[in-house]
Amino acid sequence: MATISVNGMKRDVQASTDTPLLYVLRNELELSGPQFGCGLAQCGACSVLLDGKEIRSCTTTLAAVGNKEVTTLEGLSARWAQQKGLPAADLHPVQQAWIEEQVPLCGFCQNGMMIKATELLEQNASPSVAEIKDAFTKSGPSAHLCRCGSYTAIIAAVQFAAMQTGKGGAR
Ligand code: FES
Ligand code: FES
């Protein structure tokens, strides 16, 4: 049993501390944004933010989370609202950009893609195409994989989101 902070709330969970965070999020907390792809930190489908850094929740144990703040896809809009001092936001600009650019094909990988995009834009408000490519391929334990080949649309969506965040963002 442990208490973790997820999307701004303290949550008591029953799983043992060596349980992968992904299982806790999906099975106990019913947060189905993070997906089980490889289970080996090799695809990025399970990604979440841990104190703002993208991590692979399939290989991160509950013990490793400790007191750090977990943000899942479901928490991105509230994260954005808090950062901007807004009472609430329907969507994070990254999520809005994914809709505008019609990024998902099957959609399975897109949780991790939006988490990675959020991390990138929090660190670099106006990334170049090369910086976007590097973020998705070199900045984590492995590249973020999309079996459907949505990579071009992802780059366009990150650029769209950068424009939105730069001018205050979607509400
Ligand atoms: S499921 Fe975690 S990186 Fe693939
Ligand atoms: S949209 Fe299908 S795996 Fe990426």
Image (spheres, rainbow, N blue to C red):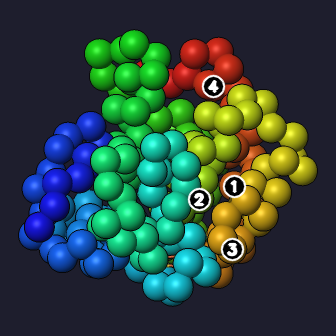
Of discs 2 and 3, which sits in the foreground? 3
Circle number at residue 33? none
Q: Identify residue for label 1.
A: 154
Beta carbon at label 2 within 8 Å of ligand 2: yes
Marks 2 and 1, how far apart at CA: 8 Å
Marks 1 and 3, how far apart at CA: 17 Å
Q: Is residue 19 left or right of residue 149?
A: left
Image quadrant assignment for residue 142: bottom right
Q: Position of residue 91 (x, y in %)?
A: 41, 35
Q: Nearer the viewer, residue 143 or 100?
A: 143
The three-letter amino acid code for the residue at tag 4 is Gln
Query: For the residue labelled by badge 1, is the local secondary structure a helix, a strand or a loop?
Result: helix
Tag 2 and tag 1, C-beta contact below 8 Å: yes
Q: Identify residue for label 2.
A: 113
Q: Identify residue for label 4.
A: 164
Q: Earlier in the sequence, mark 2 or mark 3?
A: 2
Marks 2 and 3, how far apart at CA: 13 Å
Answer few, some or many: residues within 10 Å of disc 3's Cα (few below 14, many 20 plus, some between 14 and 19).
Answer: some
Q: Identify residue for label 3.
A: 142
Q: Nearer the viewer, residue 160 or 17?
A: 17
